[in-house]
Structure formats: C-alpha cells, structure tokens
Image (cartoon, rainbow, N blue to C red):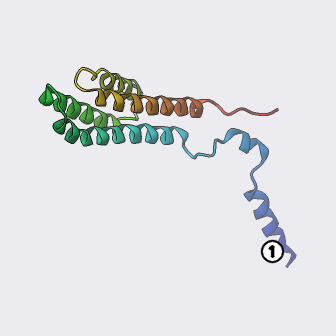
Amino acid sequence: MAGVEQVREDAVDQAEPNDADDATRSGLRDPQRAVRGLGAMVLALEGLVLLLAIAPLNMLDVPNVGLAIGVVVALSVASMALAGMMRRPWAWHAGWAVQAALLACYPLHWMLTAIGVVFALVWLYSLHVRRVLSRPPVRDL
C-alpha cells in the first residue's frame, strides 16, 4: 500500500511545474502560430467587410461606382489571399500595403477610408501582439 502512495506522490510532483518552466512559458503552446492566426483572422474579416461594402456603394451616389466596386473587390481578394499566406514573413508587410491602399480610397468614397482607418488600427494592434509574443519572456532572478 505504501508503494501505491509513493507512486501517487511522484505523479503529483511531476505534474507541478517548477519555477524555471513558468518563467520561460507564455501560456501558449505555439505563440507564433497564434499570431499568424490573429493576422489571418484580421485580413479575412477585412475581406468580408469589404465585400459587404459593395451594396452601400451601389445605393450611394458614388461618381465612379464601377471603379469603386472594382477596387473593393480587388482589395478583398488581396486580403483574403494574404490571410492564407501568413506563414511567409513578407505577408505582414503586404498586409500594411492593403491597409494603405484602403486608406488611399478617399477619392472614391469616404466610407472606404473609414473602413481603412478601423482596420489599420486593428492591424496595428495585431502587430503589437506579434511583437510582444515574439520577445523572449522576462525572467525574475
């Protein structure tokens, strides 16, 4: 009976993490994968919002409605394609290019620039999360 209790105590000791392991862990199994998922989610959501912006562009008095819809569809396709390429390091820079292109759509309609401002701020936050999670953890000595 004493042998069974010793085995249980050994199992409990192995289950408790030591302090050195806690200092090196971020709480995520694979932080880089989580960051890529965040970037892909932001770009995919931006692509969906841009596709949903086509209907108001048709209803509003937009001078070049065909050009505006073409630009929106192109940016939506680009953001959806980049969402699938987040493993590549250049995809983060290309994501900035999509945000800049959307901000430059003010001559087409101010609504597109408003969408660009919102998603540029979300993209900036995702880059902040990427930078924080890519740093090595701080150890208290």
Q: Quadrant of the N terminus?
A: bottom right
- For label 1, count other residues whose C-alpha is less than 10 Å away and answer few (under 14), some (14-19) or many (20+): few
Q: What SS does tag 1 mark?
A: helix
- From the top left corner, tell me how far across and down residue 6 is, in percent: 84, 69
Compared to residue 25, the image places residue 108 above or below, namely above
Residue in the foreground of this view, choosing between 3 and 53: 53
Residue beneath the point at 14% across and 30% down: 65
For this orientation, the residue located farthest to the bottom is 1
From the top left corner, tell me how far across and down residue 38 is, in percent. 46, 40
Residue 82 relative to residue 92: left or right: left
User: Which quarter of the rendered picture does the C terminus lie within?
Assistant: top right
Amino acid tagged 1: Val
Give residue 53's position: percent from left, percent from top: 25, 39
The foreground one among 6 and 91 is 91
User: Residue placed at 31% from the left, 41% from the top?
Assistant: 49
Compare residues 70 and 31 and report the one nearer the observer.
Answer: 70
Instruction: List the residue tagged with mark 1.
Output: 4
